[in-house]
Image: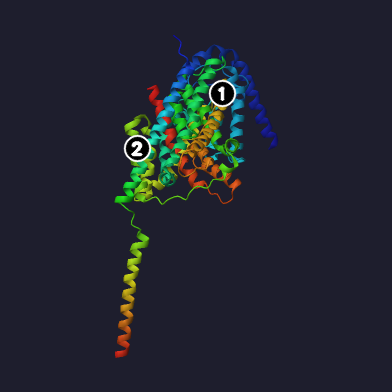
Amino acid sequence: MKKNVIKILTLLMLFGFSSLYASGSAADTSSHEVSTKKVETYQTQSFGEMIEGFINSTGIKAFVSPNPDELSSHGEKMSDFHKSWGRIIMILIAFLLFYLAIAKGFEPLLLLPIGFGGLLANIPVAGIAGPDGFLGIMYEMGLANQFFPILIFMGVGAMTDFGPLLSNPKTALLGGAAQFGIFGTLVGAVALAQYTPLFDFTLQQASAISIIGGADGPTSIFIATKLAPELLGAIAVASYSYMAMVPIIQPPIMKALTTDAERRIKMSTMRHVSRLEKLVFPIMVLVLAILVLPDATPLIGAFMFGNFLKESGVVDRLSDTMQNALINIVTIFLGLAVGSKLAADQFLVADTLAILALGVVAFSAGTAAGVIMAKIMNLFPGNKINPLIGSAGVSAVPMAARVSNKVGMEYDRSNMLLMHAMGPNVAGVIGSAVAAGILISLFS
Amino acid sequence: METNLVVEGVKFMGLGMGAVFLFLAVMIFLMSIMSRVVHKFFPEVQPSASSSSSSAQNNQKKVVAAITAAIKFHREG
């Protein structure tokens, strides 16, 4: 029995090798014809050719000696580095994102789909992120036209409670001040482009980068796809990784800018907010946006739609779907589609480093501006504000508010700042949507 | 003529921060007006407190009436 198997195997091998040699010369001359006719009919191949073809189609071959004619997902030429080492580095970066998401708990809901999308996008030959691959299709379906971020905004709206903001309206100014993170970074990015030869950002690109300072993932993606789609991968990764790092980035800045006495300020208890107020608020803000800044209404409209359904109290089924099923499905699509932009030829460029650096500057500037604004407001008569809630003006709901609460508790165990910090936090979401609308209006 | 990007950036910043603050300031203004109007003209009826207490009073009256009737019935019978 065993002998028979071995015999058959050797026969097969012999057959294979002999036909390899026999067809060697013929294959060279006919390869051009085969490639043009391949589409129409299946050409019979000798077994040797099949083996050769298989070896040429393996991933190992594609990594070691990439096909010089292979084009990127944009149909542009790629350098050999991006096709071989670049892809390996990107796959390792995807593994790093997995590690951060699973072991460190950094925004796993987004970093896992983005990381896996990045892994899939860097597979050679298969072209998953190309126009016909499923990641490419997802990108075209919902990201290139800014559809997914809008849907996410709807879900976030349905999860948001404007009660804390309504009970202490003036804290909305803190959410405005934190948008300095966006515009301050914009100036920084164009200064880099102007005065260093290394980077060459256009105003559009600088604006798309600076929106990271809004600390709002969907808004960043919305703006990036609109103004600088080539930077989307880096911007989304920077935005979500820094949002995950809010508890690390913010506290040192908050502590550096406040005195011990300020950190212990207790804020007056919140008044009760009636249901009608909560119901009128989303419509009121939307009408204001319609009158002042129609360019921001896609974001604010979707946000307020979600919130209005929730506060109406009569369509719990719909608001429940938005908060859970819909936002979960869209998150999967959005993450994978963003991951498709982590292809080596787009991510492994000097610009990415600048984006990562500018992103952390943007976050810090926003945090600092919020805290300083709270201190300025305390110079005026009226109820005192604990400056620690100023940092919650960067959107990052509800992470930034939790950080304010935690830092406050470090100095006074009985000082609960969470609900007070939610006011500037949700105002920050509105503020960054307004900032996004302004940037769009400036370029239209 | 080459445009100075930094100057453009600063212009963006001025307009952007101005518009964000303007928007939020108007929003705060409208919010406080809206709250005042709502509290003045549509004060929230405390459904749990007022309606249940009145129904509880009604219930008690009924119970008292029932007990008196029962006692009366018992004495007479």
Identify the residue at image location x=43%, y=27%: B16
Q: Amino acid at mark 2?
A: Leu
Identify the residue at image location x=50%, y=26%: A184
Task: Locate residue A70, reporting x and y percent.
Answer: 53, 19
Determine the chain carrying the residue at label 2: A
Q: Quadrant of residue A61?
A: top right
Front one among A229 and A281? A281
Q: Mark 2, mark 1: which one is toward the viewer?
A: 2
As drawn, is B7 to the left or to the right of B38?
right
Secondary-structure class at tag 2: helix
> What residue sits right under mark 2 in the picture?
A286
As drawn, is A418 to the left or to the right of A61?
left
Identify the residue at image location x=35%, y=69%: B56
Task: Locate residue A437, reporting x and y percent.
Answer: 40, 29
Front one among A112 and B6? B6
Secondary-structure class at tag 1: helix
Which numbered tag is attached to residue A354?
1
As drawn, is A314 to the left or to the right of A400?
left
In 3D space, how far apart are the residues under numbered discs 2 and 1 (Cα atoms)? 35 Å
Residue A123 visible in the shown view: no
